[in-house]
Image: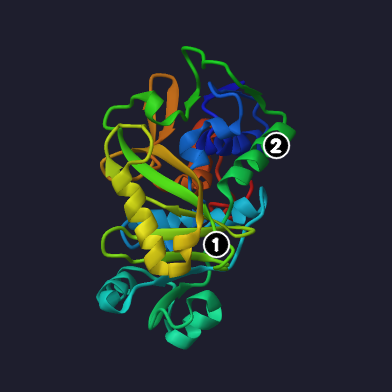
Amino acid sequence: MISIAGAGVSGLACAYELAKRGAEIQVYELGSAPFDNPCSWFAGGMLAPWCEGETAEPEVVRLGIGALDWWRQITEVTERGTLVVAQGRDRAELARFARRTENHVMLSANEVAKKEPALAGRFQQGLFFGEEAHINPRQALVDLTAAVQALGVVIHYDTPAPAQVDVDCRGMVAKLPGLRPVRGEMAVIESHEVEITRTIRFLHPRIPLYLVPRGKGIYMIGATMIEGSSSGPITVRSMLELLGAAFALHPALGEAAVLETGVGLRPSFDDNMPRLTQIGATTHVNGFYRHGFLLAPAMAKQLCAQLLQDTPHANQSEFEPC
Protein backbone atom coordinates (compact mmCIF):
# COMPACT_ATOMS: atom_id res chain seq x y z
CA MET A 1 0.00 0.00 0.00
CA ILE A 2 1.31 3.44 -0.99
CA SER A 3 -0.28 6.55 0.53
CA ILE A 4 -0.30 9.89 -1.31
CA ALA A 5 -1.19 13.29 0.14
CA GLY A 6 -2.80 15.62 -2.36
CA ALA A 7 -5.08 15.04 -5.36
CA GLY A 8 -3.94 17.85 -7.61
CA VAL A 9 -2.36 17.13 -10.95
CA SER A 10 0.94 15.90 -9.47
CA GLY A 11 -0.68 13.65 -6.86
CA LEU A 12 -3.05 12.14 -9.42
CA ALA A 13 -0.25 11.64 -11.98
CA CYS A 14 1.81 9.82 -9.36
CA ALA A 15 -1.18 7.68 -8.38
CA TYR A 16 -1.83 6.84 -12.05
CA GLU A 17 1.73 5.75 -12.82
CA LEU A 18 2.12 3.76 -9.61
CA ALA A 19 -1.26 2.03 -10.06
CA LYS A 20 -0.39 1.08 -13.65
CA ARG A 21 2.54 -0.81 -12.22
CA GLY A 22 0.31 -2.75 -9.85
CA ALA A 23 0.72 -0.73 -6.66
CA GLU A 24 -2.23 -0.34 -4.31
CA ILE A 25 -2.80 3.38 -3.77
CA GLN A 26 -4.70 5.50 -1.25
CA VAL A 27 -4.92 9.26 -1.91
CA TYR A 28 -5.91 11.81 0.74
CA GLU A 29 -7.32 15.18 -0.25
CA LEU A 30 -8.62 17.97 2.00
CA GLY A 31 -10.88 19.29 -0.75
CA SER A 32 -14.18 17.73 -1.67
CA ALA A 33 -13.61 17.35 -5.44
CA PRO A 34 -10.97 17.93 -8.16
CA PHE A 35 -11.99 21.57 -8.51
CA ASP A 36 -11.00 22.27 -4.90
CA ASN A 37 -7.32 22.34 -5.90
CA PRO A 38 -6.83 25.99 -6.96
CA CYS A 39 -3.31 25.68 -8.36
CA SER A 40 -4.35 22.90 -10.76
CA TRP A 41 -7.85 24.28 -11.37
CA PHE A 42 -6.61 27.72 -12.47
CA ALA A 43 -3.79 26.43 -14.69
CA GLY A 44 -3.49 27.28 -18.36
CA GLY A 45 -3.09 23.65 -19.46
CA MET A 46 -0.48 24.45 -22.11
CA LEU A 47 1.67 21.55 -23.27
CA ALA A 48 4.32 23.90 -24.63
CA PRO A 49 7.81 22.72 -23.71
CA TRP A 50 9.61 24.62 -26.47
CA CYS A 51 7.93 27.93 -25.64
CA GLU A 52 8.73 27.41 -21.96
CA GLY A 53 12.36 27.08 -22.98
CA GLU A 54 12.43 30.85 -23.47
CA THR A 55 12.87 31.32 -19.72
CA ALA A 56 13.03 27.81 -18.24
CA GLU A 57 15.94 25.44 -17.78
CA PRO A 58 16.69 23.08 -20.72
CA GLU A 59 15.53 20.22 -18.50
CA VAL A 60 11.96 21.59 -18.67
CA VAL A 61 12.00 21.17 -22.44
CA ARG A 62 13.49 17.69 -22.25
CA LEU A 63 11.09 16.42 -19.61
CA GLY A 64 8.07 18.17 -21.08
CA ILE A 65 8.31 16.83 -24.63
CA GLY A 66 6.57 13.56 -23.72
CA ALA A 67 3.67 15.18 -21.89
CA LEU A 68 1.50 15.37 -25.00
CA ASP A 69 1.60 11.60 -25.56
CA TRP A 70 0.87 11.01 -21.87
CA TRP A 71 -2.16 13.28 -21.77
CA ARG A 72 -3.55 11.78 -24.98
CA GLN A 73 -4.21 8.63 -22.93
CA ILE A 74 -6.20 10.60 -20.34
CA THR A 75 -8.14 13.48 -21.87
CA GLU A 76 -8.86 15.42 -25.05
CA VAL A 77 -5.77 17.22 -26.37
CA THR A 78 -6.05 20.16 -28.78
CA GLU A 79 -3.10 19.78 -31.12
CA ARG A 80 -2.96 23.05 -33.04
CA GLY A 81 0.40 24.37 -31.89
CA THR A 82 1.30 27.68 -30.28
CA LEU A 83 1.42 31.02 -32.10
CA VAL A 84 3.70 33.70 -30.63
CA VAL A 85 3.16 37.28 -31.79
CA ALA A 86 4.26 40.81 -30.91
CA GLN A 87 3.29 44.26 -32.08
CA GLY A 88 5.51 45.96 -34.64
CA ARG A 89 7.31 48.10 -32.09
CA ASP A 90 8.15 44.93 -30.11
CA ARG A 91 9.63 42.91 -32.98
CA ALA A 92 12.91 42.78 -31.08
CA GLU A 93 11.10 40.80 -28.38
CA LEU A 94 9.91 38.31 -31.00
CA ALA A 95 13.47 37.95 -32.32
CA ARG A 96 14.76 37.42 -28.79
CA PHE A 97 12.08 34.77 -28.16
CA ALA A 98 13.12 33.01 -31.37
CA ARG A 99 16.79 32.99 -30.35
CA ARG A 100 16.02 31.47 -26.97
CA THR A 101 13.74 28.69 -28.22
CA GLU A 102 13.74 25.81 -30.70
CA ASN A 103 11.39 23.82 -32.92
CA HIS A 104 9.54 26.77 -34.44
CA VAL A 105 9.13 28.46 -37.81
CA MET A 106 8.92 32.19 -38.50
CA LEU A 107 5.66 33.24 -40.17
CA SER A 108 4.96 36.23 -42.37
CA ALA A 109 1.92 38.44 -41.86
CA ASN A 110 -0.01 36.42 -44.46
CA GLU A 111 0.95 33.15 -42.79
CA VAL A 112 -0.16 34.46 -39.39
CA ALA A 113 -3.50 35.39 -40.98
CA LYS A 114 -3.86 31.89 -42.45
CA LYS A 115 -3.26 30.31 -39.05
CA GLU A 116 -5.62 32.66 -37.23
CA PRO A 117 -7.85 34.75 -39.53
CA ALA A 118 -8.99 36.83 -36.55
CA LEU A 119 -5.47 38.23 -36.32
CA ALA A 120 -5.22 39.18 -40.01
CA GLY A 121 -3.49 42.50 -40.51
CA ARG A 122 -2.53 42.85 -36.86
CA PHE A 123 0.96 41.33 -36.80
CA GLN A 124 3.79 41.47 -39.32
CA GLN A 125 5.46 38.29 -38.09
CA GLY A 126 4.86 35.37 -35.77
CA LEU A 127 6.56 32.26 -34.44
CA PHE A 128 4.73 28.97 -34.83
CA PHE A 129 5.49 25.99 -32.59
CA GLY A 130 3.64 23.31 -34.51
CA GLU A 131 4.25 20.38 -32.13
CA GLU A 132 2.77 22.07 -29.07
CA ALA A 133 -0.76 21.61 -27.77
CA HIS A 134 -3.10 22.42 -24.91
CA ILE A 135 -5.69 20.74 -22.74
CA ASN A 136 -8.56 22.01 -20.66
CA PRO A 137 -7.03 21.54 -17.20
CA ARG A 138 -10.39 21.35 -15.47
CA GLN A 139 -11.66 18.57 -17.69
CA ALA A 140 -8.22 16.95 -17.53
CA LEU A 141 -8.37 16.82 -13.72
CA VAL A 142 -11.80 15.21 -13.87
CA ASP A 143 -10.63 12.71 -16.51
CA LEU A 144 -7.42 11.91 -14.64
CA THR A 145 -9.41 11.35 -11.45
CA ALA A 146 -11.64 8.89 -13.32
CA ALA A 147 -8.59 7.17 -14.82
CA VAL A 148 -6.91 6.58 -11.46
CA GLN A 149 -10.15 5.36 -9.91
CA ALA A 150 -10.58 2.93 -12.80
CA LEU A 151 -7.19 1.49 -11.82
CA GLY A 152 -8.47 0.86 -8.31
CA VAL A 153 -7.02 3.95 -6.62
CA VAL A 154 -9.07 5.08 -3.63
CA ILE A 155 -9.35 8.86 -3.18
CA HIS A 156 -10.42 10.03 0.27
CA TYR A 157 -11.92 13.50 -0.20
CA ASP A 158 -12.54 15.84 2.75
CA THR A 159 -9.88 13.86 4.59
CA PRO A 160 -6.62 15.11 6.12
CA ALA A 161 -3.60 13.02 5.21
CA PRO A 162 -2.19 10.77 7.94
CA ALA A 163 0.78 12.08 9.86
CA GLN A 164 3.01 9.73 7.84
CA VAL A 165 2.51 9.25 4.09
CA ASP A 166 4.72 7.68 1.46
CA VAL A 167 4.32 10.48 -1.11
CA ASP A 168 3.50 14.15 -0.45
CA CYS A 169 2.15 16.21 -3.38
CA ARG A 170 0.52 19.06 -1.45
CA GLY A 171 2.39 22.04 -2.86
CA MET A 172 2.86 24.89 -0.40
CA VAL A 173 1.10 22.96 2.36
CA ALA A 174 4.14 20.69 2.55
CA LYS A 175 6.31 23.56 3.89
CA LEU A 176 9.50 22.16 2.39
CA PRO A 177 12.77 23.99 3.01
CA GLY A 178 13.46 26.38 0.14
CA LEU A 179 9.93 26.19 -1.27
CA ARG A 180 8.39 29.58 -2.03
CA PRO A 181 5.02 30.66 -3.47
CA VAL A 182 4.74 32.44 -6.82
CA ARG A 183 1.33 34.02 -7.24
CA GLY A 184 -0.39 33.54 -10.59
CA GLU A 185 -3.57 35.37 -11.58
CA MET A 186 -5.87 34.63 -14.49
CA ALA A 187 -9.23 35.48 -15.98
CA VAL A 188 -11.77 33.59 -18.06
CA ILE A 189 -13.47 35.71 -20.70
CA GLU A 190 -16.18 35.10 -23.29
CA SER A 191 -16.19 36.69 -26.74
CA HIS A 192 -18.25 35.73 -29.76
CA GLU A 193 -16.66 38.44 -31.91
CA VAL A 194 -13.18 36.88 -31.99
CA GLU A 195 -12.54 33.25 -32.92
CA ILE A 196 -9.09 31.96 -32.03
CA THR A 197 -8.37 28.25 -32.30
CA ARG A 198 -4.93 27.74 -30.73
CA THR A 199 -2.85 29.05 -27.84
CA ILE A 200 -1.58 32.56 -28.47
CA ARG A 201 1.41 34.02 -26.64
CA PHE A 202 1.46 37.78 -26.97
CA LEU A 203 4.78 39.43 -26.11
CA HIS A 204 3.26 42.54 -24.58
CA PRO A 205 5.82 44.96 -23.05
CA ARG A 206 4.14 45.25 -19.64
CA ILE A 207 2.86 41.73 -19.13
CA PRO A 208 3.33 38.86 -21.59
CA LEU A 209 -0.10 37.35 -22.15
CA TYR A 210 -1.22 33.88 -23.03
CA LEU A 211 -4.69 33.21 -24.37
CA VAL A 212 -5.94 29.63 -24.43
CA PRO A 213 -9.22 28.77 -26.19
CA ARG A 214 -11.67 26.66 -24.23
CA GLY A 215 -14.31 26.44 -26.99
CA LYS A 216 -17.64 28.17 -27.55
CA GLY A 217 -16.06 31.62 -27.41
CA ILE A 218 -14.47 31.12 -23.99
CA TYR A 219 -10.80 31.88 -23.39
CA MET A 220 -8.47 31.73 -20.43
CA ILE A 221 -6.03 34.62 -20.23
CA GLY A 222 -3.08 34.87 -17.88
CA ALA A 223 -0.93 34.96 -16.08
CA THR A 224 1.00 37.06 -13.66
CA MET A 225 4.10 35.81 -11.84
CA ILE A 226 4.33 37.68 -8.55
CA GLU A 227 6.65 36.72 -5.73
CA GLY A 228 4.38 36.59 -2.68
CA SER A 229 2.19 34.44 -0.49
CA SER A 230 -1.13 36.31 -0.72
CA SER A 231 -3.96 34.11 -1.97
CA GLY A 232 -6.47 36.97 -2.00
CA PRO A 233 -8.51 37.95 -5.07
CA ILE A 234 -6.89 39.34 -8.19
CA THR A 235 -5.67 42.90 -7.80
CA VAL A 236 -6.90 45.88 -9.82
CA ARG A 237 -3.43 46.36 -11.30
CA SER A 238 -3.20 42.75 -12.47
CA MET A 239 -6.72 42.82 -13.87
CA LEU A 240 -5.98 46.01 -15.80
CA GLU A 241 -2.75 44.55 -17.18
CA LEU A 242 -4.33 41.27 -18.24
CA LEU A 243 -7.35 42.89 -19.86
CA GLY A 244 -5.22 45.66 -21.40
CA ALA A 245 -2.95 43.07 -23.01
CA ALA A 246 -5.99 41.15 -24.29
CA PHE A 247 -7.37 44.38 -25.77
CA ALA A 248 -4.01 45.03 -27.47
CA LEU A 249 -4.05 41.51 -28.92
CA HIS A 250 -7.45 42.24 -30.50
CA PRO A 251 -9.63 45.31 -29.79
CA ALA A 252 -12.82 43.26 -30.02
CA LEU A 253 -11.73 41.48 -26.85
CA GLY A 254 -12.47 44.76 -25.12
CA GLU A 255 -16.14 43.82 -25.42
CA ALA A 256 -15.63 40.35 -23.95
CA ALA A 257 -17.45 39.36 -20.77
CA VAL A 258 -15.30 38.51 -17.76
CA LEU A 259 -16.75 35.24 -16.50
CA GLU A 260 -14.28 34.42 -13.76
CA THR A 261 -11.01 35.41 -12.15
CA GLY A 262 -8.71 33.19 -10.13
CA VAL A 263 -5.50 33.08 -8.15
CA GLY A 264 -3.13 30.20 -7.49
CA LEU A 265 0.07 29.98 -5.48
CA ARG A 266 2.62 28.02 -7.48
CA PRO A 267 5.08 26.11 -5.30
CA SER A 268 8.59 26.86 -6.54
CA PHE A 269 12.20 26.23 -5.58
CA ASP A 270 14.94 28.72 -6.30
CA ASP A 271 15.63 27.24 -9.75
CA ASN A 272 11.90 26.92 -10.60
CA MET A 273 12.41 23.21 -11.26
CA PRO A 274 10.39 20.37 -9.68
CA ARG A 275 12.21 17.78 -7.66
CA LEU A 276 11.80 14.65 -5.56
CA THR A 277 12.84 15.35 -1.98
CA GLN A 278 13.22 12.56 0.55
CA ILE A 279 12.48 13.52 4.15
CA GLY A 280 12.37 10.53 6.45
CA ALA A 281 10.08 7.92 4.92
CA THR A 282 8.22 10.47 2.74
CA THR A 283 9.05 11.36 -0.84
CA HIS A 284 7.94 14.89 -1.67
CA VAL A 285 7.04 15.62 -5.29
CA ASN A 286 6.96 19.38 -5.42
CA GLY A 287 8.18 22.66 -6.89
CA PHE A 288 6.35 22.59 -10.23
CA TYR A 289 6.25 26.41 -10.56
CA ARG A 290 4.19 27.05 -13.73
CA HIS A 291 4.82 23.62 -15.24
CA GLY A 292 2.41 21.35 -13.37
CA PHE A 293 0.50 19.81 -16.28
CA LEU A 294 3.63 19.81 -18.45
CA LEU A 295 6.01 18.07 -16.04
CA ALA A 296 3.75 16.00 -13.76
CA PRO A 297 3.98 12.93 -16.07
CA ALA A 298 7.79 12.94 -16.07
CA MET A 299 8.03 13.46 -12.32
CA ALA A 300 5.52 10.66 -11.71
CA LYS A 301 7.72 8.31 -13.72
CA GLN A 302 10.76 9.40 -11.74
CA LEU A 303 8.82 8.61 -8.56
CA CYS A 304 8.09 5.11 -9.87
CA ALA A 305 11.78 4.58 -10.53
CA GLN A 306 12.58 5.61 -6.98
CA LEU A 307 9.84 3.77 -5.12
CA LEU A 308 9.49 0.65 -7.24
CA GLN A 309 12.97 0.46 -8.80
CA ASP A 310 11.04 0.75 -12.06
CA THR A 311 13.54 0.70 -14.93
CA PRO A 312 12.29 1.14 -18.53
CA HIS A 313 13.46 -1.37 -21.10
CA ALA A 314 16.39 -0.31 -23.23
CA ASN A 315 14.18 0.55 -26.22
CA GLN A 316 11.61 2.52 -24.23
CA SER A 317 11.50 6.27 -23.86
CA GLU A 318 10.96 7.88 -20.48
CA PHE A 319 7.29 8.39 -21.30
CA GLU A 320 6.33 4.98 -22.60
CA PRO A 321 4.43 2.66 -20.26
CA CYS A 322 6.46 -0.13 -18.72
Which residue appears at 43% of the width and 69% of the height?
Answer: 251
Above or below, 203 against 224 in this view is: below
- Compared across the picture, whether 219 is left or right of 239 comes to right
Q: Residue 121 placed where, x, y %?
A: 44, 83
Q: Amino acid at mark 2?
A: Ala
Mark drawn on residue 173: none
Q: Is residue 199 visible?
A: yes
- Compared across the picture, whether 75 is left or right of 178 comes to right
Above or below, 232 against 226 in this view is: above
CB under 8 Å between discs 2 and 1: no
Q: Residues within 10 Å of mark 1 (few under 14, many from 20)?
A: many
Which residue appears at 64% of the width and 48% of the height?
Answer: 321
For this orientation, the residue located farthest to the top is: 163
The residue at which mark 2 appears reads as 146
Between 239 and 127, the one lying in front of the other is 239
Quarter of the image for residue 274 reads top left
Q: Residue 63 placed where, x, y %?
A: 45, 53
Which residue appears at 31% of the width and 65% of the height?
Answer: 204
- Compared across the picture, whether 49 is left or right of 316 comes to left
Q: Amino acid at mark 1?
A: Ala
Q: Residue 190 placed where, x, y %?
A: 55, 56
Above or below, 92 against 209 in this view is: below
Quarter of the image for residue 173 reads top left
Q: Residues within 10 Å of mark 2 (few under 14, many from 20)?
A: some
Mark drawn on residue 133: 1
Quarter of the image for residue 36 reads top right
Above or below, 74 against 211 in this view is: above
Q: Residue 127 placed where, x, y %?
A: 41, 75
The kind of secondary structure element at disc 1 is strand
Q: Is residue 294 visible?
A: no
Q: CA distance from mark 2 to mark 1?
A: 22 Å
